[in-house]
Amino acid sequence: MPRQRTPTYLYFVLIISLAFLGSQLLMSLLMKTSDILDEIDIFRSLTAGGHSDQPLDTGAGDKHQFDDADKHCSPGHFQLNNDGICHPMLTCKDIQDNVNAIQHIGGGAVKQVYLARWKKYKVILSNLSHPSFTDDFLYGAEMLQQFQPNPFVTRLLGLCLSVPAIVTEYHSFGSLENINSILKEKDEDNVVTRFKLCLDYVKIINFLHSSPTGTHVMCDSNDLTKTLSQFLVTSDLHLVINDLDALPVVDSSKASLIKCGHREIVGDFVAPEQLWPYSGVEFNDAQMPGYDEKTDIWKIPAVVDYLLGEDVHGDVVRFNLFKLHQKCSSKDPTLRPTAAEVLKGYLDVQQTLKL
């Protein structure tokens, strides 16, 4: 029986079908490519528009003064609100006679913090909570003095060791705990601003670990909320460290380690080496091993994860930081990167994503 030939129209249908499937695959590929390009464009547009490094005016008494303001003043003087007036550092008499507390805004075991007024300026007045914590209070005052002037540290305006009392600059946004509401209020809730805050945080850790006064460890950081409360948000949406009364020094050359307090530390936020290592044995501070600045490195991923927020573009940043954060989360502290290495990694990500 002769073999039947396939009708020509069937070949035509087959060719059309293959062409259609090919076009669908091509369209799918083009759409995926377009999505990737859109993601990149979003980052670039966020960087190019809607964001400025210029300070935002939030009212009297709240201008961030870490530009060139104090360079026009002689040592021991400060300038507020860019008003061109160089004020001498406030003395005990100045504080007692002219700094008036307006409202209690916080405090803890070491100090009580008040919103206060000096002349026409709003300032922050910190007083000792209890005589038993005098040494801690004075240590914080000493750190403030030694770190001045510094873009990473809140500005010291006056000091009285006999009372004792500390006067520092006022930041109306308050602590980093308020960051989500702050960004919404300023219409700055985007990945560029959030990453800038993350970068500030890492820069401050790097400064503390490499400061002229030694390698300092942030001990007031046993949970996320407490850690965030150590930083203030400036009017131009940068960070400064504010609480300096628990910054012990590690001396690696002498194998001198530290311990954050004399009580048992618990929780999964702190580094593993900060936990009591002897299961089934009651905690004894004398037997608790010391540790070093790598405890701060352990906490970086958790703090940054919070600061990046829930925006989808934050996930792109997280992805680019993943390997670095894995190293930060090494249970062996010697395997964690230094703060300088972490900062370099963040700067690389900033450059890669054009943030």
Image (tube, rainbow, N blue to C red):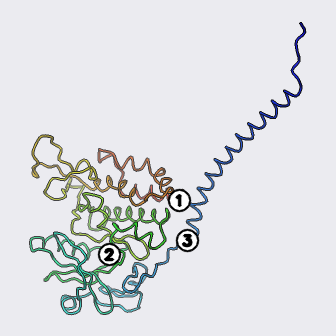
Say which of 80 and 189 sits in front: 189
* Residue 154 image label: 2
Q: What element carries label 2?
A: loop
Q: Mark 1 Cα within 10 Å, few/some/many (few <14, many 20+)?
A: few
Q: What element carries label 1?
A: helix
For residue 40, say whether it is visible.
yes
* Residue 253 image label: none
Whether residue 322 sits left or right of residue 20 in the image: it is left
Measured Cα–Cα span from mark 2 to mark 1: 28 Å
Q: Residue at 17% x, 47% y: name it.
A: 276
Whether residue 214 sits left or right of residue 263 in the image: it is right
Q: Residue at 48% x, 56% y: name it.
A: 314
Q: What element carries label 3?
A: loop
- The location of residue 326, given as percent across then percent down, is 39, 46
Return the residue at label 3: 50
Measured Cα–Cα span from mark 3 to mark 2: 27 Å
Return the residue at label 1: 351
Q: Do the residues labelled 2 and 1 touch (CB within 8 Å)?
A: no
Residue 131 lies, with reference to residue 348, above or below; the image says below
